Amino acid sequence: MLLKDKVAIVTGAAEGIGAGVAEVFAEQGARVYLGDIAKEAVEARAASIRGKGAQAFGHLMDVTRTDQVQAVVSAAMDRYGRIDILINNAGIYPRQPFLEMTEQQWDQMQDVNAKSMFRTCRAVTPHMVAQRSGHIVNISSVTFFLGTVNLVHYVASKGAVVGFSRSLARELGTHNIHVNCITPGAIETFGEAAIGVTQEQINEMIGMQTLKRRLHPKDIANVCLFLSSELSSGMTGQTLNVDAGWVMH
Ligand code: NAP
Protein backbone atom coordinates (compact mmCIF):
# COMPACT_ATOMS: atom_id res chain seq x y z
CA MET A 1 0.00 0.00 0.00
CA LEU A 2 1.51 3.29 -1.09
CA LEU A 3 -0.39 5.54 1.36
CA LYS A 4 -0.76 3.38 4.46
CA ASP A 5 -2.05 5.52 7.39
CA LYS A 6 -1.50 8.79 5.51
CA VAL A 7 -4.12 11.48 6.12
CA ALA A 8 -5.47 13.07 2.94
CA ILE A 9 -7.94 15.85 2.16
CA VAL A 10 -9.59 15.80 -1.28
CA THR A 11 -11.75 18.73 -2.43
CA GLY A 12 -14.70 18.32 -4.80
CA ALA A 13 -14.80 14.64 -3.87
CA ALA A 14 -18.51 13.81 -4.22
CA GLU A 15 -18.26 13.20 -7.97
CA GLY A 16 -15.89 12.87 -10.89
CA ILE A 17 -12.13 13.10 -10.54
CA GLY A 18 -12.23 13.92 -6.80
CA ALA A 19 -14.36 10.86 -6.04
CA GLY A 20 -11.95 8.73 -8.08
CA VAL A 21 -8.99 10.10 -6.11
CA ALA A 22 -10.71 9.41 -2.78
CA GLU A 23 -11.44 5.82 -3.81
CA VAL A 24 -7.91 5.09 -5.04
CA PHE A 25 -6.35 6.70 -1.95
CA ALA A 26 -8.59 4.66 0.38
CA GLU A 27 -7.61 1.45 -1.49
CA GLN A 28 -3.98 2.43 -0.87
CA GLY A 29 -4.48 2.68 2.90
CA ALA A 30 -5.06 6.42 3.37
CA ARG A 31 -7.54 7.97 5.77
CA VAL A 32 -9.47 10.25 3.48
CA TYR A 33 -11.37 13.46 4.19
CA LEU A 34 -13.74 14.12 1.30
CA GLY A 35 -14.94 17.72 0.99
CA ASP A 36 -17.63 19.01 -1.36
CA ILE A 37 -20.28 21.68 -1.75
CA ALA A 38 -22.81 18.82 -2.22
CA LYS A 39 -23.17 17.69 1.41
CA GLU A 40 -25.42 14.65 1.01
CA ALA A 41 -23.56 13.36 -2.03
CA VAL A 42 -20.16 13.64 -0.35
CA GLU A 43 -21.42 11.94 2.80
CA ALA A 44 -22.80 9.12 0.64
CA ARG A 45 -19.49 8.80 -1.23
CA ALA A 46 -17.56 8.58 2.06
CA ALA A 47 -20.04 6.01 3.41
CA SER A 48 -19.57 3.87 0.32
CA ILE A 49 -15.77 3.97 0.80
CA ARG A 50 -16.17 3.07 4.49
CA GLY A 51 -18.34 0.15 3.36
CA LYS A 52 -15.22 -1.29 1.71
CA GLY A 53 -13.37 -1.19 5.05
CA ALA A 54 -11.45 2.09 4.68
CA GLN A 55 -11.52 5.19 6.86
CA ALA A 56 -13.30 8.00 5.02
CA PHE A 57 -15.17 11.08 6.21
CA GLY A 58 -17.52 13.22 4.13
CA HIS A 59 -17.77 16.94 4.94
CA LEU A 60 -19.60 19.96 3.61
CA MET A 61 -16.66 22.00 2.29
CA ASP A 62 -17.39 24.80 -0.12
CA VAL A 63 -13.88 25.83 -1.15
CA THR A 64 -15.01 29.46 -1.39
CA ARG A 65 -15.73 29.38 2.37
CA THR A 66 -12.68 29.76 4.61
CA ASP A 67 -14.67 28.61 7.67
CA GLN A 68 -15.70 25.35 5.97
CA VAL A 69 -12.15 24.69 4.75
CA GLN A 70 -10.81 25.33 8.25
CA ALA A 71 -13.44 23.02 9.80
CA VAL A 72 -12.26 20.05 7.71
CA VAL A 73 -8.60 20.77 8.50
CA SER A 74 -9.47 20.95 12.21
CA ALA A 75 -11.44 17.68 12.02
CA ALA A 76 -8.44 15.88 10.50
CA MET A 77 -5.99 17.43 12.98
CA ASP A 78 -8.22 16.63 15.97
CA ARG A 79 -8.57 12.98 14.96
CA TYR A 80 -5.14 12.14 13.55
CA GLY A 81 -2.84 15.05 14.50
CA ARG A 82 -1.47 15.36 10.97
CA ILE A 83 -2.32 16.04 7.33
CA ASP A 84 -0.03 14.41 4.79
CA ILE A 85 -1.77 15.09 1.50
CA LEU A 86 -3.97 17.80 0.01
CA ILE A 87 -5.61 17.30 -3.40
CA ASN A 88 -7.04 20.58 -4.68
CA ASN A 89 -9.53 19.26 -7.21
CA ALA A 90 -12.82 21.21 -6.75
CA GLY A 91 -13.56 23.26 -9.82
CA ILE A 92 -16.30 24.51 -12.14
CA TYR A 93 -16.30 24.99 -15.90
CA PRO A 94 -19.49 26.68 -17.17
CA ARG A 95 -19.09 27.95 -20.75
CA GLN A 96 -19.62 31.64 -21.48
CA PRO A 97 -18.69 33.70 -24.55
CA PHE A 98 -16.23 36.41 -23.52
CA LEU A 99 -18.34 39.17 -25.10
CA GLU A 100 -21.22 38.23 -22.79
CA MET A 101 -19.15 37.51 -19.68
CA THR A 102 -19.99 39.47 -16.55
CA GLU A 103 -17.55 40.54 -13.88
CA GLN A 104 -19.49 38.39 -11.42
CA GLN A 105 -18.99 35.28 -13.63
CA TRP A 106 -15.28 36.04 -13.93
CA ASP A 107 -14.94 36.51 -10.17
CA GLN A 108 -16.83 33.33 -9.32
CA MET A 109 -14.58 31.28 -11.61
CA GLN A 110 -11.42 32.66 -10.04
CA ASP A 111 -12.84 32.21 -6.55
CA VAL A 112 -13.76 28.51 -6.96
CA ASN A 113 -10.89 27.39 -9.18
CA ALA A 114 -7.94 29.52 -8.10
CA LYS A 115 -8.46 31.44 -4.84
CA SER A 116 -9.72 28.21 -3.27
CA MET A 117 -6.17 26.92 -3.45
CA PHE A 118 -4.93 29.87 -1.41
CA ARG A 119 -7.58 29.01 1.22
CA THR A 120 -6.86 25.28 1.45
CA CYS A 121 -3.08 25.59 1.26
CA ARG A 122 -3.04 28.44 3.78
CA ALA A 123 -5.01 26.24 6.21
CA VAL A 124 -3.03 23.02 5.66
CA THR A 125 0.58 24.08 5.13
CA PRO A 126 1.35 25.28 8.70
CA HIS A 127 0.68 21.68 9.81
CA MET A 128 2.86 20.28 7.01
CA VAL A 129 5.65 22.69 7.98
CA ALA A 130 5.42 21.47 11.59
CA GLN A 131 5.59 17.84 10.37
CA ARG A 132 8.39 18.69 7.94
CA SER A 133 6.55 16.77 5.20
CA GLY A 134 3.61 17.10 2.87
CA HIS A 135 2.32 16.50 -0.63
CA ILE A 136 0.00 18.91 -2.43
CA VAL A 137 -1.46 18.19 -5.87
CA ASN A 138 -3.37 20.93 -7.67
CA ILE A 139 -5.70 20.13 -10.57
CA SER A 140 -5.34 22.49 -13.53
CA SER A 141 -6.42 21.62 -17.10
CA VAL A 142 -4.96 20.80 -20.53
CA THR A 143 -6.92 23.83 -21.76
CA PHE A 144 -4.15 25.97 -20.25
CA PHE A 145 -1.84 24.74 -23.05
CA LEU A 146 -4.50 24.94 -25.77
CA GLY A 147 -6.59 28.03 -25.10
CA THR A 148 -10.32 27.33 -25.47
CA VAL A 149 -13.21 29.41 -26.80
CA ASN A 150 -16.00 30.27 -24.33
CA LEU A 151 -13.71 29.40 -21.43
CA VAL A 152 -11.47 32.47 -21.10
CA HIS A 153 -12.31 32.81 -17.41
CA TYR A 154 -11.73 29.08 -16.82
CA VAL A 155 -8.44 28.84 -18.69
CA ALA A 156 -7.17 31.96 -16.89
CA SER A 157 -8.03 30.33 -13.55
CA LYS A 158 -6.23 27.13 -14.55
CA GLY A 159 -3.15 29.11 -15.60
CA ALA A 160 -3.19 30.67 -12.15
CA VAL A 161 -3.13 27.16 -10.68
CA VAL A 162 0.08 26.33 -12.57
CA GLY A 163 1.78 29.56 -11.45
CA PHE A 164 0.57 29.14 -7.88
CA SER A 165 1.90 25.57 -7.76
CA ARG A 166 5.35 26.50 -9.04
CA SER A 167 5.81 29.41 -6.66
CA LEU A 168 4.45 27.55 -3.64
CA ALA A 169 6.78 24.64 -4.45
CA ARG A 170 9.76 27.03 -4.47
CA GLU A 171 8.73 28.61 -1.19
CA LEU A 172 7.91 25.43 0.75
CA GLY A 173 10.59 23.08 -0.57
CA THR A 174 12.84 23.84 2.38
CA HIS A 175 10.12 22.37 4.61
CA ASN A 176 10.06 19.13 2.57
CA ILE A 177 6.65 19.99 1.13
CA HIS A 178 6.05 18.82 -2.44
CA VAL A 179 3.69 20.85 -4.62
CA ASN A 180 2.83 19.54 -8.08
CA CYS A 181 0.13 20.03 -10.64
CA ILE A 182 -1.85 17.87 -13.09
CA THR A 183 -3.41 19.09 -16.32
CA PRO A 184 -6.16 16.57 -17.19
CA GLY A 185 -7.42 16.24 -20.74
CA ALA A 186 -11.04 15.28 -21.46
CA ILE A 187 -12.19 13.09 -18.58
CA GLU A 188 -15.57 11.33 -18.54
CA THR A 189 -17.25 12.82 -15.45
CA PHE A 190 -20.58 13.98 -14.08
CA GLY A 191 -19.48 17.59 -14.61
CA GLU A 192 -18.70 17.00 -18.26
CA ALA A 193 -22.12 15.44 -18.80
CA ALA A 194 -23.80 18.29 -16.90
CA ILE A 195 -22.51 20.93 -19.31
CA GLY A 196 -23.98 18.96 -22.21
CA VAL A 197 -20.87 17.78 -24.07
CA THR A 198 -22.19 15.91 -27.13
CA GLN A 199 -21.02 12.57 -28.54
CA GLU A 200 -19.80 14.46 -31.61
CA GLN A 201 -17.60 16.70 -29.43
CA ILE A 202 -16.31 13.64 -27.56
CA ASN A 203 -15.41 11.95 -30.86
CA GLU A 204 -13.58 15.12 -31.94
CA MET A 205 -11.54 15.14 -28.71
CA ILE A 206 -10.67 11.45 -29.05
CA GLY A 207 -9.63 12.21 -32.62
CA MET A 208 -7.07 14.70 -31.30
CA GLN A 209 -5.79 12.28 -28.64
CA THR A 210 -2.96 9.86 -29.42
CA LEU A 211 -4.55 7.09 -27.33
CA LYS A 212 -7.97 6.46 -28.85
CA ARG A 213 -10.04 5.94 -25.72
CA ARG A 214 -11.93 7.95 -23.16
CA LEU A 215 -10.04 8.92 -20.02
CA HIS A 216 -11.73 8.24 -16.66
CA PRO A 217 -11.29 9.69 -13.15
CA LYS A 218 -9.03 6.76 -12.25
CA ASP A 219 -6.53 7.84 -14.92
CA ILE A 220 -6.08 11.11 -13.00
CA ALA A 221 -6.37 9.47 -9.58
CA ASN A 222 -3.43 7.17 -10.32
CA VAL A 223 -1.22 10.15 -11.17
CA CYS A 224 -2.39 11.89 -7.97
CA LEU A 225 -1.32 8.73 -6.16
CA PHE A 226 2.13 8.88 -7.76
CA LEU A 227 2.52 12.57 -6.86
CA SER A 228 1.33 11.96 -3.27
CA SER A 229 3.59 9.00 -2.53
CA GLU A 230 7.28 8.29 -2.10
CA LEU A 231 7.40 7.25 -5.77
CA SER A 232 7.71 10.96 -6.68
CA SER A 233 9.96 11.98 -3.78
CA GLY A 234 12.39 13.72 -6.15
CA MET A 235 9.74 15.90 -7.81
CA THR A 236 8.22 19.27 -7.00
CA GLY A 237 6.94 22.29 -8.91
CA GLN A 238 6.04 20.12 -11.92
CA THR A 239 3.00 19.99 -14.17
CA LEU A 240 2.10 16.52 -15.45
CA ASN A 241 -0.15 16.43 -18.48
CA VAL A 242 -2.59 13.47 -18.42
CA ASP A 243 -4.56 13.78 -21.65
CA ALA A 244 -4.04 10.56 -23.64
CA GLY A 245 -1.38 12.30 -25.71
CA TRP A 246 -3.44 15.28 -26.90
CA VAL A 247 -0.86 17.98 -26.19
CA MET A 248 2.86 17.08 -26.12
CA HIS A 249 5.45 19.42 -24.65
P1 NAP B 1 -17.36 17.28 -11.43
O1 NAP B 1 -17.71 15.93 -11.99
O2 NAP B 1 -18.32 18.40 -11.61
O3 NAP B 1 -17.03 17.10 -9.88
C1 NAP B 1 -16.59 18.22 -9.17
C2 NAP B 1 -17.17 18.21 -7.78
O4 NAP B 1 -16.79 19.47 -7.15
C3 NAP B 1 -18.70 18.16 -7.78
O5 NAP B 1 -19.15 17.29 -6.77
C4 NAP B 1 -19.07 19.62 -7.48
O6 NAP B 1 -20.32 19.75 -6.82
C5 NAP B 1 -17.94 20.03 -6.57
N1 NAP B 1 -17.85 21.47 -6.39
C6 NAP B 1 -18.27 22.47 -7.23
N2 NAP B 1 -18.05 23.66 -6.66
C7 NAP B 1 -17.48 23.43 -5.45
C8 NAP B 1 -17.06 24.26 -4.39
N3 NAP B 1 -17.19 25.59 -4.44
N4 NAP B 1 -16.53 23.69 -3.29
C9 NAP B 1 -16.41 22.35 -3.21
N5 NAP B 1 -16.82 21.50 -4.16
C10 NAP B 1 -17.35 22.04 -5.29
O7 NAP B 1 -15.96 17.81 -12.03
P2 NAP B 1 -14.74 17.00 -12.66
O8 NAP B 1 -14.97 16.89 -14.11
O9 NAP B 1 -14.44 15.79 -11.87
O10 NAP B 1 -13.57 18.08 -12.46
C11 NAP B 1 -12.75 18.10 -11.32
C12 NAP B 1 -11.57 19.03 -11.55
O11 NAP B 1 -10.86 18.61 -12.70
C13 NAP B 1 -11.99 20.49 -11.81
O12 NAP B 1 -11.05 21.34 -11.20
C14 NAP B 1 -11.90 20.59 -13.31
O13 NAP B 1 -11.66 21.91 -13.75
C15 NAP B 1 -10.74 19.68 -13.60
N6 NAP B 1 -10.72 19.17 -14.97
C16 NAP B 1 -11.73 18.36 -15.42
C17 NAP B 1 -11.68 17.89 -16.74
C18 NAP B 1 -12.72 16.98 -17.31
O14 NAP B 1 -12.68 16.72 -18.50
N7 NAP B 1 -13.67 16.48 -16.54
C19 NAP B 1 -10.62 18.28 -17.56
C20 NAP B 1 -9.62 19.10 -17.06
C21 NAP B 1 -9.68 19.54 -15.76
P3 NAP B 1 -21.63 20.07 -7.74
O15 NAP B 1 -21.78 18.92 -8.68
O16 NAP B 1 -22.73 20.16 -6.74
O17 NAP B 1 -21.34 21.38 -8.44
Image (cartoon, rainbow, N blue to C red):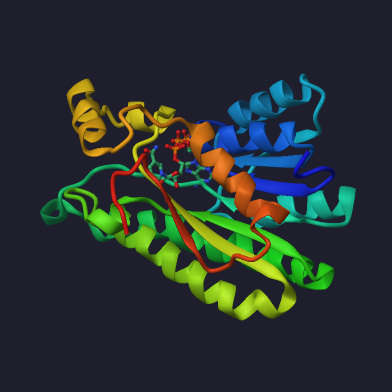
Along the line of sight, the residue nearer the viewer: 104 or 249: 249
Q: Quadrant of residue 210?
A: top left
Q: Can residue 68 be seen in the rendering of this structure?
A: no
Above or below for 242 versus 134? above
The reply, left or right, for residue 20 in relation to residue 23 is left
Label tally: 0
Along the line of sight, the residue nearer the viewer: 79 or 198: 198
What's the residue at 81%, 33% (across, down)? Answer: 55
In percent of width and height, residue 1 lies at 78, 38
The reply, left or right, for residue 194 in relation to residue 32 is left
Above or below for 201 versus 18? above
In percent of width and height, residue 158 lies at 38, 58
Above or below for 209 versus 79? above
Along the line of sight, the residue nearer the viewer: 222 or 63: 222
What's the residue at 55%, 45% (across, down)? Answer: 223
The reply, left or right, for residue 144 in relation to residue 241 is left
In percent of width and height, residue 140 lies at 42, 54
What's the residue at 18%, 48% (across, down)? Answer: 150
In percent of width and height, residue 115 lies at 48, 63
Position of the C terminus, as image quadrant, is bottom left
Q: Can residue 131 be seen in the rendering of this structure?
A: yes
